[in-house]
Image (cartoon, helix red, strand yellow):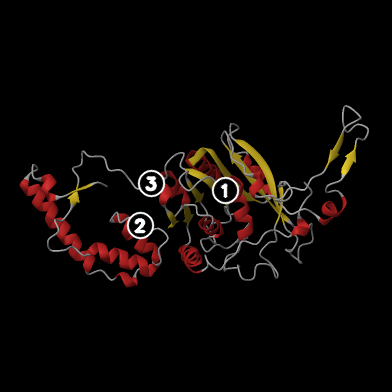
Amino acid sequence: MYVWSILACLAKNTNSRSNKIDAAADTVKSQTTMDYASKTLSELKTICRERKIKGFSGKSTKELITLIQSKDEVPTNTIVEVEAPAEVEAPMEPIVLRQDVLNGDTIVILPTLESDSAQIIIADPPYNIGKDFGNDSDKQPMDEYLIWCEKWIKECLRILKPNGTMFIYGFSEILALILSKVPYSVNRRWIVWHYTNKNVPSLNFWQRSHESILVLWKSDKVFHRDDIREAYTEGFLNGAAGKERKATKGRFSKGDKSTTYTAHANGALPRDVIKVAALAGGAGMNERVNHPTQKPLTLCDKLIRSCKQSATDGYVLVPFAGSGSECLAAKKLGLPFVGIELNPEYVTLIHQRLEEKTQTEEVVPPSESLSANP
């Protein structure tokens, strides 16, 4: 919000000005006596927003306390600043500059976000299968669950930029029902996250080895295929790369054509089946945290890199932040993000990952043995 000094307000009513100065002085007094050391990282960020202190994104708890305390100190020769008159519209800090996780209900928070502002949305909602997320919300009658899904999908599509991309995780049988709540005017593709290192021995049925990902976009999609190419298989490199394939019957309309396979420097074209190990068994031991449905950082990184734009072209929105993998991947790629998480314990967990592990958690590329041909 713009602020005016007392000198700029001399033409205003003296009593009104005096009241504002007294209020400002009282505010400064209360601020200087506050025990910031007892506040959590999320609470300190809330204080920064309320006081319109800029530059708090990405700072640690200690750095935030120092920043807030520096704003509490009012030199004796400094004119106290007061708010502008009500008729002056107050410009807000652009959300694209933020890197933050909000604690609250996504159904409540999403409507407060600006339309056409997010370049990427990654939604990993509860699958309605009875998982314990600490809030007793992952088991509803299916019709109620789908009504709930329709609400947040509608808001997410409003927030998504015209050239943005939205990803929704889910088991195929549930995601197919969720897809029915997506307007027909929205473009869609179905991709698969495939893993083979996770099973349920007690299950007397087909073992699940994949989760589906619904990809949505409004109009012109952004896709960087060269940024997410995959390693070639040994069979292709040893058997086909650089060799000429003669024309075969039915392959070309003219029988005299042939093809020479050339290996691309960055690997094979990306497929719609992404092969990344789940965080189970011995996989991802250094990455795993206490969350029942944590997604691998490698998978999150690939989704974001497939369609990311510049840091000034919008933020990454994570409406169900969970373990924070998507937020961490966005931060590693230098993108602003806004995560929303209902469980305060998970919010604390995400902040810890963002602060403590940004420099240690590495994005591990998918195994070369799992990659496809060009």
Q: How many marks can you see?
A: 3
Q: Residues within 10 Å of mark 2 (few under 14, many from 20)?
A: few
Q: Is residue 279 above or below residue 175?
A: below
Badge 3 is on which residue? 94
Q: Amino acid at mark 1?
A: Tyr
One can see residue 360 in this view: yes
x and y percentages locating residue 18 in the rendered image: 9, 52
Residue situated in front as seen by the camera: 65 or 23: 65
Q: Amino acid at mark 2?
A: Gly
Q: Is residue 292 above or below residue 317?
A: below
Label annotation for residue 55 = 2
Q: Mark 1 or 2 closer to N-term?
A: 2
Q: Mark 3 or 2 closer to N-term?
A: 2
In the figure, is residue 223 to the left or right of 78? Answer: right
One can see residue 295 in this view: no
Marks 3 and 2, how far apart at CA:
12 Å
Q: Quadrant of residue 146?
A: top right
x and y percentages locating residue 369 in the rendered image: 78, 59
Residue situated in front as seen by the camera: 34 or 175: 34
Label annotation for residue 145 = 1
Q: Amino acid at mark 3?
A: Pro
The kind of secondary structure element at disc 3 is: loop
Q: Is residue 166 above or below residue 344?
A: above
Q: Nearer the viewer, mark 3 or mark 2?
A: 2
In the figure, is residue 110 to the left or right of 73? Answer: right
